Image (tube, rainbow, N blue to C red):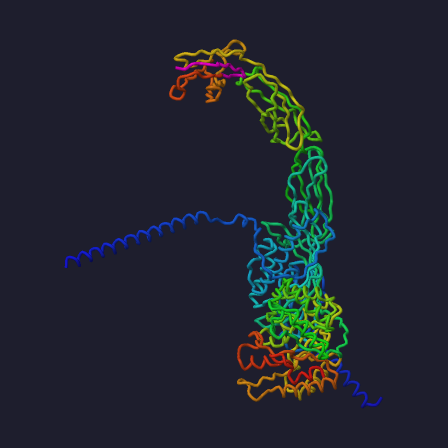
Amino acid sequence: MVNNTKIRVNTNRKILRIVLMLSYVLISSVVIFLLSSLYSFFNIGAERAKILHTEVKKEDQYLPKIIWKQDGNEGREMDEQVLNNIENDYLDAWYIKQMAYRNNSIEGVDDYFTESARKNLFNFIDYNKKENIHLESTTLEHNPDVLFFSEDGQLIVLEDKDVVQYKKVLKSNEVLLETTEKSSYKMILLAEDGFWRIRHLVKENTKEVNEIILPSSIDLSTIKGINYYPQDTPWTMFGDKFDSKIIAKDFQIIKDANLNTIRIFIPYEEFGKAKVKEDKLKKLTQVLDLAEKSGLGVIVTLFDFYGNYDTTDWTLNHRHAETIVTKLKDHNAILAWDVKNEPNLDFKSRGKQQVISWLEHLIILIKSIDKNHPVTIGWSNAESASILKDKVDFISFHYYEDYKNFEAAYDKIKEEAPNKGIVLGEFGTSSYSGFWKPFQNSKKKQLTYHKEMQKVLTLRGIPFISWTLYDFNTVPKQVVGKLPWRVQPQKRFGFIDVKGNKKPSFEHISK
Amino acid sequence: MNSKHQFLFIFLWLIAIAIPAQDSLFLITEKKDFYAGDTISLSFKNKSNTSSYQLFCTNSYGSTLITPDKNEDILIFNIPQFISNKTGILHWKLIGNNQNISGKLSITSYRKPTSLETYIGPPTIEAGGIDYAMIIVIPTDSLDNPIPENSKVDVKRQFLQSENKQTILTKDLIGYLNIFSPTPSGRMLISTESYELNSKEYTLDILPAIGKNFKVFHERDHKYADGNQITTLYTSIIRDKNNNVVSDGTFVDFFITNQDGNILNTSGTTIRGIATASIIHPDCEATWNIKAFIDGIANSDVLQISYAKVIHKIPVKFSEDNRIITVGPLISFMEQMIPDGLQIELSMYKEGKFLNKIVEQSKDGFTTFKINPNIYKSGNYEIQITSACNTKIYKSIKLW
């Protein structure tokens, strides 16, 4: 008994001691925590730099082409630093204005228009809000010229000639008008609180543009090609596993099969969007160099895995295309530019008219940079093939239907666009016959398909680019989704199987 | 021509009229040039009954759609006032019709400004005809539009006795004029006038240019190095190249080099061109070379002044075990007691090793040093006493 009590007392004391110690530790840490929070509270202040607006974070959201006419100006001499500030604020003013009219909100307008000037914008916004009018617009090109810079550095007169402005006007959410204008403005900007703000804006001239695109001639009839991805890196050709040796070997296979053309794809985001990554460009140039060495022409398909088309995105898209086209337009291997692969698949989700306008302005851009190479759009079916037929240099479409109906589909396009060259940009069939699609396909059926297609193509002299050289082990989910009955057949479109053996269809890869 | 052919002809003719008339709209409004603030409306003759038309309208600041008023077979689009109030090109386009009907209106402002937005910068310039300020005028009409190019603006200015007027023409929305500084400094008043509208008054300060080299002078009560009186250094009136007195507050540095090459420094700022600075007399015989500078701009010539010795001997008395040392009386140049505050130093050495220096100031011509027995034990010490550049050395003083 006694002993037990003693033990209990001892235990209780121990527990008490532990509890006391723990609570002491707890209270101390709470006090330290509170004191340290208090200390840090009094030591965190606003960054001094913020007072001066020097640290406004800039993201690429609006990058129209801007070419300063640097021919001097009246008044004070302009220096690079000031010109940079003006360019930033001036473009921001345009962007803010476009966003204001898009959403009918006045957010940010105060920063880029002086008190008297912003009233003019507010009038429009109020009116448009009342009438339920929205304007989606962007500018694609600016040619500003400083006419006058005041001696105290606080005022400039700017002329912006031939501003290419795309506008889409919606009333009650229905698109009523789409137009592209070329306008010239004169304006006065004042430096206020670290911003260059627009004080007066006068439109001096404007005209609607319907750019006439000069066709570039090319002999299509010799094109015998194949859509190309390396076997191990389909849809991620320019990634970390890029291997020029494999590509060189593949090109030799293609060349030996009597083909003369390949079609490759440039993923938009992977290439760095508006600021194209240098290393990706290097890899792309390497591919073109290898193609040139093997005597293959290359059709470069831009904007792969891109699907936004929104007006606010246009200037970024344009910088992307501009960089790539400018860099490669003189490369001997370039055969043609394909603006986008199967854009008609996005008609439903993004609006047909929006997608078409997007394509049209990109064609204008690409052709303004590269006057020698033809431009096309890789429509996914024969029905869409004649869209923008007057803007592209040749029509290209993809055909995955029954080979028996091919000639009819081709003839229909020919009828719609009798004077345009037509290239069959993709065609092929899967040899997959497994759990998900039993008995439908086989290597033999694939053989027949290509044999029959080649018969028509040769007979009619139709240039073709088939899908594709290899069977793949993986297909990224962005391509056909995750459903196995779609993914599995997609892996078996090749002329060469996963083990590297030529399938029977290989015999008809080019004839 | 038989009747059959005639009928056919008439029939075809009717069709020919009917086809364009069917879905056609004609713009009735002929006027294409308007003034800002005018009520603008575009009228179309509309044969068909449909009126689901909209007018797309875009001006300098934005775009919108306008819904028409229908009046029998005429469609009227009233351009909202906020659009017709702004100058520039107004582009319009009819929507809801297959024909491409569009046009441009030009809206200009009256040459009747109601406000003169005037900017002058910089607000101060340097006299001498090289520096200039710029005046920029944006004449705007009552609807805040810049008035047309080549409008006249008079720039009026008054300076000292002269008043003049200069006419400029606006170009690229503004008018500007460079105003070069006159030779004298002063304040210039500027105003502008355009088509009988006057601006308010603007001032432009013409500041003197930078100073030219100058002279430096001194003033003192006596020539003795008593460490007590103050010598005042001052410059001649500092002027710029156009003889304008430099701006008040121009900073002048006086550098004093003494006979040992040490440099003393004092400074002052100008008032009416003269900078003054004070410095206390040295306490021993000295020759000073003084040169003044406006840093990086101008300097004076060298002024040399000398100070005569005042204390010729230092009487020293040891008492109370030699631990109380009385220095004095210290006699100045007229045998008077030296003014309080003369510095006297006592240095202690033992066996050639420096121990300490005690500094005291004179009071009523005397100073007393007490050597603390707790610090300095009994023994032989060397003691040196220095004041006003005189040193007295006691090689071996025994302290008890």
In the figure, B377 relative to A305: above or below? above
Q: Residue furthest front?
A: B351
Q: Is residue B108 visible?
A: no
Query: A33 or B53: which is nearer to us?
Result: A33
Q: Residue furthest left?
A: A1
Instruction: Give the residues in magenta.
Output: B385-400
Query: B132 or B42: which is nearer to us?
Result: B132
Q: Is residue A327 left or right of residue A471?
A: right
Residue B331 percent across, percent down from the top left:
51, 11
Which quadrant does the N terminus of chain B fall into? bottom right
Which quadrant does the C terminus of chain B fall into? top left
Residue B117 percent across, percent down from the top left:
64, 48
Residue at (65%, 24%) from the top-left corner?
B236
- Classify residue A386 by image quadrant: bottom right
Residue at (43%, 49%) from the top-left corner?
A41
Q: Residue furthest right?
A: B1
Dominant SS of magenta comes to strand
